[in-house]
Amino acid sequence: MCIVDGAAYGAHIQGIYKYSEDRLDRNIVLWMPESFEYLLLKAGIIEFEDVAKVLVEHYNYIECSKHFSWERFFTDLAIEHSSPEHKYSKKTLKSFYYSEENKEKFRKVIPEDLKKDNNSSTENSSSDGKNKMNLF
């Protein structure tokens, strides 16, 4: 299973579609939630009073002149409502976001049917050396 930021990865969907089409014998699962920041809010890692309502009815809160995309809207919410100690930034993800407690919060928002047979991964870094969050 691969979880990607839907807003950021959307432009690459044709490539992954071609990749999976050529590997029909494999179980390839791609989950593309709205954005990573959306997941931070949905999982309760970053919280504010009306977060549940905003996530369900985001179309009532986005200001088109300020936010040209849903991703920008959710990013601004994450930055605005993250604590000063764990201030969210797209450039560098603080270790707070990698904590076991927050990984568990992420796991809870993953749809149940996507969790099946996807709990054997132990890989925590990619070939480019960047740290990846292993949820399983």
Image (tube, rainbow, N blue to C red):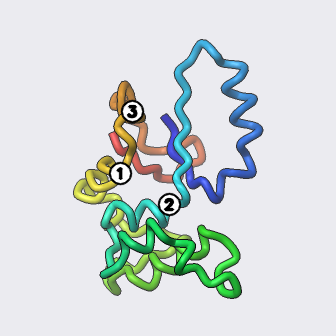
Q: Residue at x 57, y 73 (%)?
A: 59
Type of amino acid under label 3: Asp
Q: Residues within 10 Å of mark 3 (few under 14, many from 20)?
A: few
Q: Which residue is mark 3?
A: 113
Q: Which residue is mark 1?
A: 109
Q: How far apart are the two marked residues, 2 and 3, measured between alpha carbons?
A: 20 Å
Type of amino acid under label 1: Val
* Element carrying mark 2: helix
- State the image coordinates of residue 25 (x, y, percent, origin top left): 60, 12
Q: Which residue is mark 2?
A: 36
Q: Residues within 10 Å of mark 1 (few under 14, many from 20)?
A: few
Nearest to N terminus: mark 2 or mark 3: 2
Q: Residues within 10 Å of mark 2 (few under 14, many from 20)?
A: many
* Element carrying mark 3: helix
Residue 79 sits above or below residue 6 on the image: below
Type of amino acid under label 2: Phe
Q: Is residue 53 left or right of residue 29?
A: left
Residue 112 sits above or below residue 38 on the image: above
- State the image coordinates of residue 89 (x, y, percent, origin top left): 49, 75
Nearest to N terminus: mark 1 or mark 2: 2
Q: How far apart are the two marked residues, 1 and 2, measured between alpha carbons?
A: 12 Å
